[in-house]
Amino acid sequence: MRQQGGVKTIALGGRPNKDIIQAVGGVKGTNDFEWTDILYQVLYPFQIALLKTAEYYNSTALGAYTDLPLIRATNYAMNVRDGIRQGDTGETPLQFVYEPADCRIFYTPEMVVDETAVWKTVADTAFNGINHCVAGGLPGSNSSSAPPPYYGKRTTAKKHGIRAGIDRREHAEAIGSVWSDPSVARSGDSVMIL
């Protein structure tokens, strides 16, 4: 969509600097399998034992597969086919190609407690000519209206007029009360308690 259709991208967040960041994070593969599908395919030879016995398959790499990824994650998939850009003679998989976003926007305190503030800021930048980009920019956005970067406590919060009844202090206190329980035995996983 970006390369052939000219779709513009906005990236949110990142480190506290004004550098442009990548448009798409994560793996840019063209096909993926969920771990449940992979585990099903691994267990299938054990179940049908068509060519060899279950004991034989247990002595191979198939016997080492477990459901651990299903227990440790909420969204589990694996890239099984790389995406290669048309015309790339080096055939570099897209997850190794740096592709900068067109615009980068910092998160604000309002965005943390109200998802609609994120969409309002992005829509303002993309469609309403109000530039919130701290790096890059989109055609038609007024570059003189970019907000200052947020590096700490803000004296005046920028309001989008969304969900006017939100008390940001109450939400900040709730977020601040998240802590790690040191009494929980650690075995590679961490536990967060509210």
Image: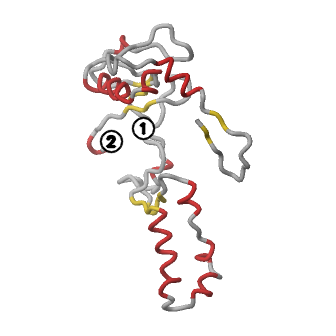
Instruction: Please tell me which residue is depicted at 60% across the width and 28% down the height of the picture.
Output: 177
- What's the distance in space between the residues labelled 2 and 1, CA to CA? 10 Å
167 or 1: which is nearer to us? 167
Q: Kindly identify the residue that appears in the image at 42 percent across and 14 percent down.
A: 147
Q: Seen in the image, is 99 located left or right of residue 191? A: left
Q: Which residue ends up furthest to the top in the rendered image?
A: 155
Is residue 93 depicted above or below 61 in this figure? above
Q: Quadrant of the N terminus?
A: top left
Image position of 94 with respect to 125: above or below: below
On the rendered structure, is 111 left or right of 175? left
Mark 1, secondary structure of its residue: loop
Proximity of marks 2 and 1: CB atoms separated by less than 8 Å:
yes
- Image location (x, y in percent) of residue 17: 55, 23
Q: Which mark is residue 23?
A: 1
Question: Where residue 146 appears, x then y in whole percent?
Answer: 39, 15
Mark on residue 152? none
Q: Nearer the viewer, residue 76 or 144?
A: 76
Viewer-side residue, 153 vs 17: 153
Q: Is residue 94 above or below residue 115?
A: below
Dot 2: element: helix
Amino acid on which disc 1 is placed: Ala
Ranked by sequence position, the earlier of labels 2 and 1 is: 2
Q: Which residue is mark 2?
A: 2
Estimate the x, y position of residue 56 in percent, counting from the top left. 61, 87
Which colouring convention does the figure follow? secondary structure
- Specify whether 1 is left or right of 11: left
Residue 144 quadrant: top left
The residue located at (61%, 39%) in the rendering is 193
